[in-house]
Image (spheres, grey):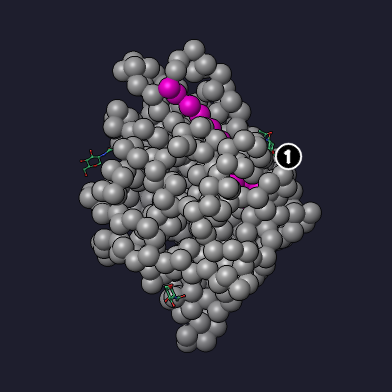
């Protein structure tokens, strides 16, 4: 077992097969708490200064090397095309694209310090020049004005873990290239609850930290080493605001890998990697499914009770890319995407994705009889899996090698550099809304 520990970790490039997962969980539980905390710290938010976004407009198209600058007519053509044709955005390949990202660190103030990869000294810039090419169609470049028009007079909440925050920050950066958002609310340790307002279209975006979606207590360095989750109770921190919301984008996953104790109806149904508690050891797949089901059901119940509608988008699992041991300085040093034939979605990430899709399908079925409640999957697992080069790695900290190569450098191979591959999630998000027929 000791030798196995040197070569495997639950968060690496090639996730353990389902058959092996209990072994991996056991290994994970044997790791010193301090090391678990290192991984865990990657998930916490840092304290960046409160700043309003600037209204800088950037359109950095290099028309000499890219297809064509955005003209109104080309945008409309793209939209008409996609409005008619259905396309599966899940499957595709990353192809080279020399266009500049819509924004950069100097033009967007909402980027978290740990995701400002180029400013933190990341030397290679190649990761910025790739475009997701779905097999059946072209994914149009993000169009901020179209997005804002589609969500005019709406309140959109991003609920879940730190990848919900990462995605919202990407979205705000892209939208702020044409319209200025104002931070109108923030609360909680590490600003885990925030709200931005776009007066131009009366659009609000809220961020709700809720990594289990259901009620619970997160593990912490000072408190218990395990999460406590109440799988049959939605977390009221976001759920109590449901009347205010027109759309919810959900992100969960990584927190379920940590040691946890699970309650249902106030009884413990089992725990994951809490050997001192004498509960039945269960893996996290059933609890994750229950947490998601409770969440989707309670959204429906509350909205139906009020006669209101809502759109709910569940973003699928975003894989991490630690090479070697995440707890021994393992990083993500690749500087290019994988080609589509190099990787398949499988193992742990495949299983989480499957659960998310099944629960959304089941929720869609349940709301057939009610108007106005819509569920959709935002399937990013595959396109994210193919981007080992898109994470901050050691550049989560400014100039990590300024004093030479350290013995241990903490790496973030979970979140995504901004700008970066996560911008694509929002491009697909926009296509989902266009497909809903809300345009014009
Ligand atoms: C799109 O492709 C994915 C992956 O192959 C598949 O799971 C999914 O069912 C497809 N979606 C549709 C709507 O066909
Ligand atoms: C960011 O974009 C602005 C405006 O297009 C440009 O002037 C600046 O050089 C860019 N900065 C970086 C670091 O790429
Ligand atoms: C957005 O929030 C502002 C307050 O900051 C409020 O006046 C406005 O009605 C809200 N709009 C929507 C669509 O929720
Ligand atoms: C777990 O079981 C062991 C052995 O029966 C016992 O000594 C220990 O007190 C129990 N722990 C808890 C938290 O119940």
Quarter holding the N terminus?
bottom right
Q: Position of residue 195 (x, y in %)?
A: 29, 47
Residue under the point 74% across and 59% down:
339
Residue that protrudes farthest toward the right in the picture? 341
Q: How many marks?
A: 1
Q: Position of residue 95 (x, y in %)?
A: 69, 61
In terms of depth relative to the viewer, which is nearer, 380 or 217?
380
Read off the magenta span. 372-383
In terms of depth relative to the viewer, which is nearer, 394 or 432?
432
Q: Is residue 39 above or below residue 363?
A: below
Q: Is residue 404 above or below residue 70?
A: below
Q: Quadrant of residue 391?
A: bottom right
Residue that protrudes farthest toward the top in the picture? 369
Judging from the image, what secondary structure is the residue with disc 1 in? helix
Q: Is residue 81 above or below residue 265?
A: below
Residue 153, visible in the rendered structure: yes
Residue 252, visible in the rendered structure: no
Residue under label 1 = 19
- 380 in the magenta segment: yes
Left or right, residue 88 beside residue 118: right
């Amino acid at each position: 077992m000791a030798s196995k520990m040197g070569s495997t970790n639950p968060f690496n490039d090639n996730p353990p097969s389902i058959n092996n997962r209990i072994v991996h969980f056991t290994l994970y539980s044997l790791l010193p708490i301090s090391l678990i905390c290192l991984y865990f710290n990657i998930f916490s938010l840092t304290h960046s200064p409160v700043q309003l976004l600037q209204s800088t407009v950037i359109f950095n198209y290099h028309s000499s090397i890219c297809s064509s600058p955005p003209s109104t007519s080309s945008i409309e053509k793209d939209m008409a095309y996609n409005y008619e044709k259905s396309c599966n955005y899940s499957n595709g390949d990353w192809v080279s694209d020399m266009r500049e990202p819509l924004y950069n660190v100097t033009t967007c103030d909402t980027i978290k310090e740990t995701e400002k990869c180029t400013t933190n000294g990341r030397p290679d810039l190649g990761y910025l020049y790739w475009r997701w090419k779905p097999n059946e169609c072209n994914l149009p470049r993000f169009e901020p004005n179209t997005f804002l028009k589609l969500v005019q007079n709406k309140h959109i909440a991003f609920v879940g873990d730190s990848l919900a925050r990462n995605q919202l920050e990407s979205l705000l950066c892209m939208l702020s290239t044409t319209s200025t958002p104002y931070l109108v609310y923030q609360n909680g340790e590490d600003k885990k609850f925030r709200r931005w307002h776009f007066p131009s279209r009366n659009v609000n975006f809220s961020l709700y930290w809720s990594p289990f979606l259901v009620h619970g207590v997160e593990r912490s360095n000072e408190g218990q080493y395990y999460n406590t989750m109440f799988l049959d109770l939605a977390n009221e921190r976001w759920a109590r605001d449901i009347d205010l919301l027109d759309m919810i984008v959900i992100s969960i996953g990584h927190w379920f890998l940590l040691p946890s104790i699970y309650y249902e109806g106030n009884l413990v149904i089992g725990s994951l990697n809490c050997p001192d508690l004498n509960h039945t050891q269960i893996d996290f797949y059933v609890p994750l499914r229950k947490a998601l089901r409770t969440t989707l059901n309670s959204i429906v119940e509350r909205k139906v009770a009020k006669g209101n509608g809502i759109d709910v988008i569940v973003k699928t699992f975003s894989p991490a890319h630690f090479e070697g041991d995440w707890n021994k300085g393992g990083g993500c040093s690749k500087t290019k995407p994988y080609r589509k034939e190099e990787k398949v979605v499988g193992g742990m990430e495949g299983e989480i994705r499957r659960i998310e899709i099944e629960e959304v399908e089941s929720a869609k079925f349940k709301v057939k009889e009610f108007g106005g409640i819509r569920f959709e999957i935002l399937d990013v697992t595959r396109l994210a899996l193919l981007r080992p080069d898109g994470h901050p790695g050691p550049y989560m900290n400014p100039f990590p090698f300024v004093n030479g190569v350290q013995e241990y450098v903490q790496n973030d191979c979970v979140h995504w550099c901004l700008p970066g591959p996560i911008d694509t999630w929002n491009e697909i998000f926009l296509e989902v809304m266009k497909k809903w027929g809300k345009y014009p």
